[in-house]
Amino acid sequence: MSDIVIVGGGVFGLSTAAQYAHSSKVSVIDKFEIPSPISASTDYNKIVRLEYNDEIYAEMAVEAMRFWQGEGSDTLPPGLLTDTYSHCGRISVVPPESSPRYTFEMESLTLLQEKFGRCQDVSEYCNDLTCNGKFSQFRESQAKGKFRYNRDCGIGIAAKSLLVMKQYCKSLGVTFIENDGAACVKSSDDGVVVSLESGAQVNGRKALIACGANTPSLLDLRQNVKSTGLYVGHIQLTEQEFEKYRDIPVVFNPVVGYFFPPDPETRVLKICASASSTYDLASNGLLPRYKKLEPDTVKSIPIQSVVQIRTLLAEYLPDLLYAADGQLREIQDCKICWISDTSDSNFIIDEVPENPNVFVSCGDSGHGYKFLPNIGSYIMARMENNLSSKLAKKWAFRESVWDNMTIPWRIEHKRRHVDQIQWY
Ligand SMILES: Cc1cc2nc3c(=O)[nH]c(=O)nc-3n(C[C@H](O)[C@H](O)[C@H](O)COP(=O)(O)OP(=O)(O)OC[C@H]3O[C@@H](n4cnc5c(N)ncnc54)[C@H](O)[C@@H]3O)c2cc1C
């Protein structure tokens, strides 16, 4: 019997396993081999940003970034994640002053500068994506607007970092049960039993359910967590194009989309469409619909999102819009990536009501990846009943209020469900 059974080896699950492994016998169960093709973080890269206007997350992001940049702790060896991190900076389009996002960004920068001494070197440029020549790669850009360059930001090499965490957990003796999903979790005052799709059972003292967007398939979270699908596409660069763009920062336009420095191993450049998302109608938005599990019905991304991605290319990276043969460059490996949303963007990290010894960590709300090095210490503290009451309250199982004002700067409300999508 394990002390701790963790269902889901994504960001929250692996981070928790790495913390518990120093004092407990831990098993991690995943439906796929980790990094799992359905994890929101099995990807080329993700932004590790500090900007939060909420002091708790800002402090956690500052703490996480120290680990990404090589610091160690009692539970993480120094340098564990440095090969999977690049402090590349970020250029963001400054939103209109009347928008909620503008307020969020300004409050965040003030908090980080005044309270944490971070993001000190932030500069703004009008209609100049090169940022006064710093990024000459963007000389041909047609993009207009005010751009803010913040060098205190980075990216994690996402799938690789999950693999590093998994290998670290293995080195600490964590048992991995992969390619066998959990089908049901039962709890009692003595412990927990997790039944797997294969029919096997895993017993433990406590369980953590950390299945990301798929968590409501295992637990009744009473409509408080929903699954939101976001759109991602990629373009393949040539060797020459890669050399030109390898050292760019992340470029983030909250209305059209955002892109990353190309991946050094594959020369693939990832582009996400902003301000558009989808959901599953049949489950009233509770469950994700993975291309991996239903390739014939969840085919790629909407044609409209590909148009959005090409609009971004035309404005920001015009020389990459067309391929060498003069045809529009293919937007490849298009996929919907599912996150687990709460209506206030706060995580849920709590014991599941009426299920003693079963805990849940979900509701990542699209901002959980950056916390890979440290979220596990908070989850473990909650499971051992020694999380500060402030944090326990913030992440408590609670009612979500889903209306048109929910997260107005992040989620758009006139969206199509998966079965209405015209696929690219
Ligand atoms: C397009 C996109 C962009 C994003 N960008 C950023 C960013 O820039 N910065 C940032 O900080 N965050 C970002 N995020 C959010 C980040 O990816 C998530 O917050 C994070 O992955 C959540 O971690 P998790 O462990 O909760 O879930 P996941 O990482 O999704 O992991 C869930 C795990 O559970 C497993 N699982 C599912 N069902 C079962 C089952 N029944 N039995 C066993 N195992 C199961 C899966 O296989 C998977 O391994 C982004 C997300 C998306 C979709």
Image (cartoon, rainbow, N blue to C red):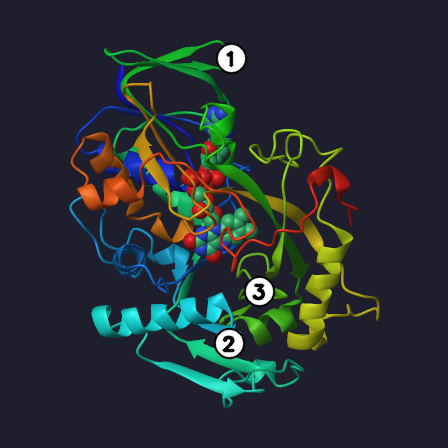
Mark 1 residue element = loop
For residue 258, the mark is 3
Compared with 386, 41 (above or below) is below
Disc 1 crowd, CA 10 A, few/some/many (<14, 14-19, 20+) = few
Residue 222 point in image, percent of width and height:
46, 28
For disc 2, the marked residue is 94
Residue type, numbered disc 1: Ser
Residue 414 in percent (x, y) is at 67, 51
Residues 334 and 303: in front is: 303
Amino acid carrying label 3: it is Tyr
Quarter assignment of residue 241: bottom right
Residue 370 falls left or right of residue 270: left
For the residues labelled 3 and 2, the Cα–Cα distance comes to: 13 Å
The structure residue drawn at horizontal position 33% and vertical position 57%, both measured from the top left corner, is: 82
Q: Which residue appears at 23% of the width and 35% of the height?
A: 382
Residue farthest right in this picture: 326
Image label count: 3
Q: Which residue is mark 1?
A: 198
- Farthest-out residue, bottom: 132
Question: Closer to the camera, 55 or 326?
Answer: 55
Badge nearest the viewer, 3 or 2: 2
Q: How far separated are the C-alphas under marks 2 and 1?
A: 51 Å
Q: Answer with left or right where residue 254 lies relative to residue 6.
A: right
Coordinates of residue 344 in the picture (x, y in percent): 42, 48
